[in-house]
Structures are given as structure tokens and as C-alpha cells.
Amino acid sequence: MSIETRLNELRELAKTYAKAQSQRVYLEEFKKSRLAQLMKRYESQYPTAAAQEREARADPQYIELLDGLRVATEEAERARWELKIAEWGVDLWRTKQANDRAERRGYGA
């Protein structure tokens, strides 16, 4: 595999990671808004903020958002580790190249 091909793969991995990470962060922030929206919905039925929050956190819309956040976090972590593994591969390739050069010069063991 050529270096340019590998660099293109790394660029694509970086894009995948950035997209997954942005989705995760968005959902983390939106979770606060959704909770507030749902608490407002339960405001007339439950007089205390604690009761409103309890109902909001049990609401199917909130649970669905949490499921989405779980998926987004999994995707972001998978992409992050794929990038990390690719970086390790580059480091190993560099080390092998350096060792090969040293061996050709007669510095090898």
C-alpha cells in the first residue's frame, strides 16, 4: 500500500471521527434542552421541579435521546480508536524503516 493511499485513509478516518464526535457533543448539549422541554410539559401536572424532572427523565423522548447518545458515543470512540491504531501503525512503519536503514549501514545487531 502506498503512503499516499494510507494518508487518504487516515484523512477519511479523521473525518469520520470528527463527525461522530460532533454528533455526540451535540446530543450531550441537546439533552439539557430536551430535559427542560419535558419538564415544562409536566409543569401543570407536577408542582415541584423534582417531580417534573423525574417524569421528564422517564419520558420516552428522553430515553430515545439517551439511546442516540449511546450510539453516538460508541461511534465516536470506535472512530477514535481506529485513528489511534492507524497512528500506531505509522509509528511502527517508521521504526521499521529506521531499523532497515541502520541495518543497511551495518549498525544492526
Image (spheres, rainbow, N blue to C red):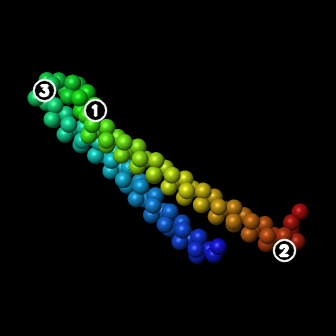
Gap between marks 2 and 3, in whole Å?
Answer: 80 Å
- Local packing at callout 3 (Cα closer than 10 Å; few below 14, some 14-19, many 20+) is few
Residue type pointed to by label 1: Arg
Q: Earlier in the sequence, mark 2 or mark 3?
A: 3
Q: Position of residue 64 (x, y in %)?
A: 31, 41
Q: Amino acid at mark 2?
A: Arg
Which residue appears at 89% of the width and 63% of the height?
109
Please say if 19 is above or below 33. Answer: below
Q: Position of residue 43 (x, y in %)?
A: 13, 30
The image shows residue 80 at horizontal and vertical percentages of: 51, 54
Residue for point 41% across, 43% down: 70
Q: Residue 87 versus residue 20: which sits nearer the camera? A: 20
Q: Nearer the viewer, residue 105 or 21?
A: 21
Q: Which residue is mark 3?
A: 45
Q: Amino acid at mark 3?
A: Gln
| Quadrant of the rendering where the N terminus is positioned | bottom right
Label 1 residue SS: helix
Residue found at x 50% / y 68%:
11
Nearer the viewer's eye, disc 2 or disc 3? 3
Residue bearing mark 2: 104
Q: CA distance from mark 1 to mark 3?
A: 15 Å
The reply to whether callout 2 and callout 1 are in contact (CB within 8 Å) is no
